[in-house]
Amino acid sequence: MQEKPREKLTRLGAQGLKDKELLALLLRTGYKGKNVAVLADEIIGKYPLIELLKLTFEELSALKGVGKSKAAGIIAGHELAKRSTDKTDKIIISKPQDVLIQLHDIRTKQKEHFVVLYLNARNELLHKEFISIGILNASIVHPREVFAPAIERLASSIIVAHNHPSGDTTPSEDDRKLTKRLIESGKLLGIEVLDHVIVSEREHFSFTSNE
């Protein structure tokens, strides 16, 4: 006799269940002519887990055998899991010092490193990416390289930064032109450039704070 998902969860814990078995537990029941195990298997076959959790409440509740009550339970469970992860894993960038902490690894580099911090609407750090590494004070950055990860990760805003190996954080004319170009590109995409920060081993310059 095949072990039921609830019995299997008791024995192995939730991590021991397949996606379709976890879904079957959330659904609880099937409908006339189709038990819950078959229903869950068919839904997962049509919508792999990532795609299933992207469905809206209306789309999910419209699936035969799901309905509004079960759809609400699935969405609520997913939201609880997301909030739990957000509260423990997310880094908040709310003040200049938060930015500088993220830039500690480039302050003493002997070549220019151009870095972008990608933030969501709550100023949580979604991603940090090295866009380019130049030779001393020569660094080439194109807006598409800066904004492509922002679009992919649904970032609301970005903070760009680079180091000056010379130790002088005064922005060059190229730094000013790049900042202006990125701000203009961000406006077209609806992604705000919050700041451009230049760091060295002992100093830092912020286009937002210093100008």
Image (spheres, grey):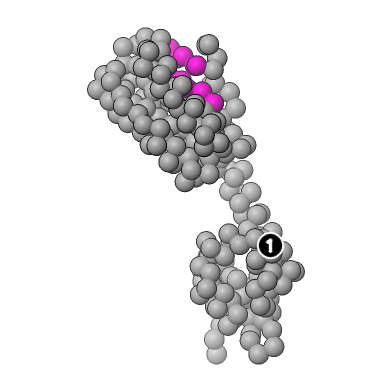
Number of marks drawn = 1
Asked whether residue 99 appears in the rendered view, the answer is: no
Dividing the picture into quadrants, the one containing residue 132 is top left
Question: Which amino acid type is shown beneath numbered disc 1?
Answer: Phe
Q: Residue 182 versus residue 121: which sits nearer the camera? A: 182
Q: Residue at x 58, y 48 (%)?
A: 85
Q: Residue 107 versus residue 207: which sits nearer the camera? A: 207
Dividing the picture into quadrants, the one containing residue 143 is top left
Q: Decide: few, some or many residues near mark 1? Use Cα within 10 Å; few <14, some 14-19, many ≥20.
A: some
Q: Residue at x 37, y 12 (%)?
A: 172
In the displayed structure, would residue 129 be above or below residue 209? below
Q: Where residue 150 sits in the image (x, y, percent)? A: 48, 40
Q: Main secondary structure of the magenta part?
A: strand
Asked whether residue 179 appears in the rendered view, the answer is: yes
Residue extending farthest to the left is 135
Magenta span contains residue 205: yes
Q: Where residue 118 sits in the image (x, y, percent)? A: 49, 36
Q: Where residue 175 sits in the image (x, y, percent)? A: 39, 18
Q: Residue at x 52, y 61 (%)?
A: 50
Give the residues in magenta.
194-207
Q: Is residue 200 left or right of residue 99?
A: left
Q: Is residue 60 left or right of residue 13?
A: right
Q: Residue at x 60, y 27 (%)?
A: 94
Magenta span contains residue 202: yes
The residue to which callout 1 is attached is 57
Where disc 1 sits, the SS reads helix
